[in-house]
Amino acid sequence: MQVEAWLQRAARTAPTVTALQAPDAQVSYEQLLWAACSGAAELSELGARAGGRVGIALVPGFGFSQALHACFLLGAVAVPVDGRLSAAERERIVAGADVIVERPLRDNRAEPTGTARNYLCASVSHDLDAPCAVIHTSGTTSAPRPIELTYGNFLWSALGSGVALGVDPRERWLCALPLSHVGGLSILVRSAIYATTAVVHERFEAERVRVSLQEQGITLVSLVATTLARLLDAGLREPPHLRCALTGGGPVPAALVRRARAAGVPVVETYGLTECCSQAATAPLAAIANDTGAGVPLFCTRTEIAPDGEIVLSGPTVARGSRAADGRLHTGDLGHIDDRGFLHVTGRKADTIVSGGENIAPSEVEAVLESCPGVLEAAVVGREDEQWGEAVTAIVVLVPGVNLEESTVREHCAVRLAPFKVPKHVTFVSESLPRTASGKLLRREL
């Protein structure tokens, strides 16, 4: 199926609406289209082609957005590159790319001329079955894997998200996530599909994000648990225009959700993966006041729980290359669906600790640990043990200036968890726990 190119349609229907507000520029949809047309012409001169890959090694901002939409107009497949990668990691990401964009393309926000005008005048369409981007997974338990996503994956994801969260024509969605990850990139794509505004920060800085939320009319923001906690620590309270703080990227402790809501921050939990083009389940806005959990599956994504507790997804948001022989995505995540239809994610199959014959989800124990006064963050792993097979072991970072005894932490857990889930050992460390750029815990480095 063919659909009108998203950027062309946005520029036609909402030419003066701000498409992008970023540190390096603020542009309307008409200006962004003109810049993307010039970018497409330049990419073509450099050897990019329809169906070929283009690495985008630019910081989040106007230059990145221009290059992304230039790829879409050209029909090339965008491969975002995280600028923090080592040279060897970067080489793996861009292997096979026809062109690597390492500097901004020609910045032409005036009406294009010459070859660039051909893209403006042509009626460009997107084939929903065609690939448009290759995103690499977070790599929390193994090396990052490339996931090829189609125009159809992104369109269905945007539609499902719009049904769950609603769409305000004056939406201003703040992105302080890496654009090399699907959660950040999806904000740029969804904004173009709906002709709304994406506000992009180059990186997450708590005070800068707090000021944006308080003073710049932000209506939506995408966060992970660690960034939400940092914003609350920075004094975020009752952002005046914010209707939703979409929070996911890993387990979100219930205590953190309650703390945010007490501060007047409308947190909505979400669950998603690169392989299903971002959101798979999102709590409805009506649930902001009371409920916790990863939310209700998007209307276009079917969610099932396998007999062993694994979350299994299917539908048009799921990447073709990530589907098993049965046509479904076996996520490797564990969870259950309650009687309200809410999905609750309890951990990773690969992370499950087997101690004394009992299965233990580290994320459940971590949530209890992080609710202990004085604990800043925590990780739980299984360590080899002659008696238990694996011993539940906690790695704890304390709030600066706080001292806790191991016995205090274990007693806190003992009144909230079954005895076999209580950590046998607690190790205190002074440095922050290793995390991916999107805030997920890197268990393979613990």
Image (cartoon, grey):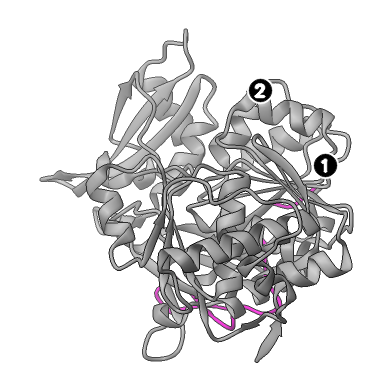
Q: Residue at x 54, y 67 (%)?
A: 71
Element at label 2: helix
The percent position of residue 99, horizontal first and vertical second, equals 39, 62
Q: Which residues are magenta?
A: 290-316
Within 10 angstroms of label 2, few (less than 14), some, or many (20 or more) residues? Answer: some
Within 10 angstroms of label 1, few (less than 14), some, or many (20 or more) residues? Answer: many
52 relative position to 305: left or right: left
Q: Residue at x 88, y 54 (%)?
A: 16
The percent position of residue 45, horizontal first and vertical second, equals 46, 66
Q: Residue at x 28, y 42 (%)?
A: 86
- Residue 212 quadrant: top right
Disc on the earlier residue, 2 or 1? 2
423 relative position to 231: left or right: left
Q: Nearer the viewer, residue 406 or 330?
A: 330
439 up-or-down from 130: above or below:
above
Amino acid found under the numbered disc labelled 1: Leu
Q: Nearer the viewer, residue 446 or 183?
A: 183
Whether 305 is among the magenta residues is: yes
Query: Which residue, given by chain and number where applicable, does mark 1 sit on?
Result: 242
Whether residue 85 is visible here, answered yes or no, is yes
